[in-house]
Amino acid sequence: MSSTASANPYRQLFAARGTLWFFVAGMIARFPSGMITLSIVMMLTHSRTNYSLPSLVASTAILSNALIAPQLSRLADRYGQSRIALPAMGVTVTAFVALMLGARLMWPAWALFVCAVGSGCIPNFGAFSRARWSHVYSGTPLLRAAFSLEALCEEMVWTCAPLIVIWCTTRLFPESGIAAAALLFTLGGLVFCAQRKSEPPALAHQSPPAPAADEGRASEVARDRSAIFMPVVLISSLALLGFGGFFGVVEVATTAFAKALGVPGKIFYPLSLCAVGSFIGGILYGRRAWGLPLRRQFLVVTGVFFASTLLFFFVGGLWGLALFCFLSGGMSAPTIIISMGLIESLVAKPRLTESMTWGLVSPLVGMALGAAVAGPVVDWAGPARAFYGVSAFGALTFAVAWVGQAWLAPPSPQGIRTVR
């Protein structure tokens, strides 16, 4: 490998045939995950007189996806990504259309909740794409760069998706945010599923591993338990839930803080700097090889994140808050990258997509939890005190990484352990 290639591994990622197509398609198919919540809120508040119903319907969609997506990924591991994703996409798009009709025709609340549950059938194309990268580059240094690129892709999606929703709903019609999400989801999902050559082999199509040669993998797959019971998956998911809680608190507390300062329109700056910091952190982490084992990197990065959250005790102005958001956000993408790397290295291939999905949906649960905690604190003690919750979630993330170190060691020849 040349020194130039070694310095910039991103250049080599797309040398393998088909990788560019599934990466771009998977990125497009991920946009609805960042659009659906805001789309529902903006659509329903246009025709309803309160914010309670829109927020509850949006939360239902989030929690539905957090529960359904890992099950879809589990089926994808067993029967193949395309075979599971295509019918799930059909259910999701139908639910999107039903939500638009329900908002336009003023359906009763229960019907909107049913549609929101159906919209949670979005396959986790982030996990699907990472499983394909693992299939192509497993065991090579390029896999770290691939996971870094995936994290950067998701940061871009979560930054741009709200802008698309705001533009559509304010310039076109109230339901156009969900319409745009359905269009991007269909286009990206169909192109992604068409890339069959890069798809990992399904468990149902593989011959059973030889007991003597792969006893650990065979026993793990034979248990057929949810991947969340694997220690590495549980630890990674809890740590990333802490990151989601951080963002949930920041979104609510920053909105209230800016309003209290009389500059509600400037909430964009602290929130966007969270994403910018994560984007830069992901690029810097993925460009070089680090000497520490992954589990030690996990501890260091979460420790730095926790230390950075202590700065929020000293929030005094909007620009200081923006700086703190930038510093703490810088640890987000590296933590996701390391978590996915730990899962990829410790989980049997037939359970990889499901395992990664648990890690990727846990921040959504954390965001819902963080927002739910921050709101009452803002009402009771003010927005400055609500930022204390940031440090609480930072402590949770670091504590999980610390306690989990023994479980994140490389597996023994007897196989991967599971929580009993």
Image (cartoon, rainbow, N blue to C red):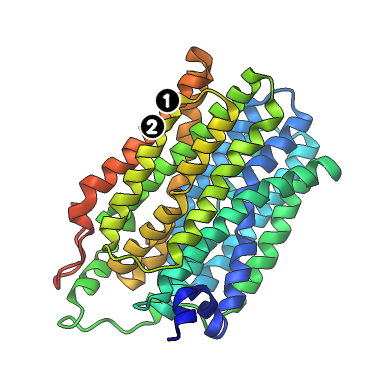
From the viewer's side, name the closer residue of 221 and 21. 21
Q: Residue at x 54, y 77 (%)?
A: 11
Up/down of 387 relative to 406, above or below: above
Residue 313 bears which disc, if any? 1
Tell me where residue 400 sits by quadrant: top left
Q: How far across and how far down the image is residue 305, in percent?
A: 38, 43
Please say whether residue 230 is visible from this viewpoint: no
* Residue drawn at x 48%, y 14% as measured from the top left: 381
> How many angstroms separate mark 2 from mark 1 (CA)?
6 Å
Q: Is residue 16 left or right of residue 300?
A: right
Which residue lies most toward the right here?
Answer: 172
* Residue 310 circle label: 2
- Mark identifier at residue 379: none
Q: Are marks 2 and 1 in contact (CB under 8 Å)?
A: yes
Query: For this view, does 289 lie left or right of residue 266?
Result: left
Q: Which image quarter: residue 70?
A: bottom left
Residue 389, quarter of the rendered image: top left
Residue 26 image point, x, y percent? 59, 66
Number of marks: 2
Image height check: is 140 above or below 408?
below
Amino acid type, callout 2: Leu
